[in-house]
């Protein structure tokens, strides 16, 4: 079983690569965005709590996000593994992911980070903004702020898993297929 954290800054290509990895390894793709949309769209107890925070413009507390993730993993135990995309975002979420998986007799197999320079990320997201419909994808100052938030709050997750020799970094530049090939070579070592 492979339990993979696909990691990297916004715009590094995680979503694109996750789709290809799902097909290659028959894994369940779990993204925080999808979790939120599902829970809120179905008015689950956690979804209703999340809506309260979002409607006030506040960040949804980690406990709610962790609960959503736990629900998804527990409801889908008969899979070949998981790709966690956009999760965990901080050390607390990392510890909770480890706890949830351990309770099911599993662990994180590895974290693979897509390394992409800041300027490339800005250009990618600005390009995506032309078709994504997301206003935050069209504002360079917001994009740069998202990169800084990633560096300060999320990047430490890489170091957390590196302590147990589970963090790996690959180049995120090149064609989609080139990056995918590098990802597969790394995953195949697990």
Image (cartoon, helix red, strand yellow):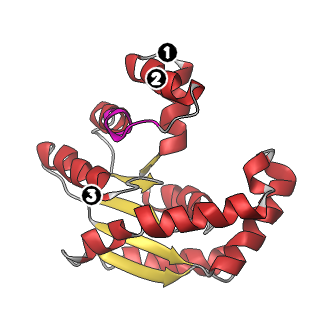
Residue 135 position in % (x across, y down)? 78, 47
- Comparing 170 with 24, the one in front is 170
Q: Residue at x 32, y 75 (%)?
A: 167
Q: Is residue 105 above or below residue 113?
A: above
> For mark 1, does the 10 Å Cα neighbourhood hold few (<14), some (14 to 19), or many (20 or more) residues?
some
First in residue order: circle 3 vs circle 2: 3
Q: Which residue is drawn at 13% across and 43% down?
A: 103
Q: As drawn, is 137 to the left or to the right of 190?
A: right
Q: Residue 47 carries which label?
A: 2
Q: Residue 43 carries which label?
A: 1
Residue 189 position in % (x across, y down)? 32, 80
Q: Residue at x 41, y 55 (%)?
A: 89
Give SS at disc 2: helix
Q: Give the range drawn in magenta.
A: 60-67
Q: In which quarter of the image is residue 78?
A: top left
First in residue order: circle 3 vs circle 1: 3
Examine the structure image and report whether residue 65 is included in the region drawn in magenta: yes
- Comparing 21 with 51, the one in front is 51
**Circles 3, 1 touching at the beta carbon (< 8 Å):** no
Q: Which residue is drawn at 21% across and 53% down?
A: 98
Q: As drawn, is 141 to the left or to the right of 159?
A: right
Q: List the residue tagged with mark 3.
A: 1
Q: Which of marks 3 and 2 is in front?
A: 2
**Circles 2, 1 touching at the beta carbon (< 8 Å):** yes
In the picture, the quarter occupied by the N terminus is: bottom left
Tell me the distance, in whole angstroms, between the alpha carbons under discs 2 and 1. 5 Å
Residue 2 position in % (x across, y down)? 31, 60
Q: Quadrant of residue 10?
A: bottom right
Tell me the distance, in whole angstroms, between the alpha carbons under discs 3 and 1. 32 Å
Residue 13 position in % (x across, y down)? 62, 66
Tell me the distance, in whole angstroms, between the alpha carbons under discs 3 and 2. 29 Å
> For mark 2, does the 10 Å Cα neighbourhood hold few (<14), some (14 to 19), or many (20 or more) residues?
many
């Amino acid at each position: 079983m492979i339990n993979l954290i696909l990691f990297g800054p916004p715009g590094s290509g995680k979503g694109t690569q996750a789709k290809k990895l799902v097909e290659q390894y028959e894994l369940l793709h779990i993204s925080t965005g999808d979790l939120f949309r599902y829970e809120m769209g179905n008015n689950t107890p956690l979804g209703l709590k999340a809506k309260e925070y979002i409607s006030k413009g506040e960040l949804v507390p980690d406990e709610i996000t962790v609960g959503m993730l736990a629900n998804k993993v527990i409801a889908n135990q008969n899979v070949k593994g998981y790709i966690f995309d956009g999760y965990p975002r901080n050390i607390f979420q990392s510890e909770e992911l480890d706890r949830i998986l351990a309770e099911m007799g599993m662990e994180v197999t590895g974290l693979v980070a897509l390394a992409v320079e800041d300027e490339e990320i800005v250009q990618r997201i600005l390009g995506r903004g032309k078709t994504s419909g997301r206003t935050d994808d069209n504002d360079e100052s917001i994009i740069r702020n998202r990169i800084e938030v990633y560096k300060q709050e999320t990047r430490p997750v890489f170091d957390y898993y590196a302590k147990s020799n589970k963090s790996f970094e690959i180049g995120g530049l090149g064609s989609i297929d080139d990056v995918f090939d590098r990802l597969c070579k790394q995953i195949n070592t697990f």
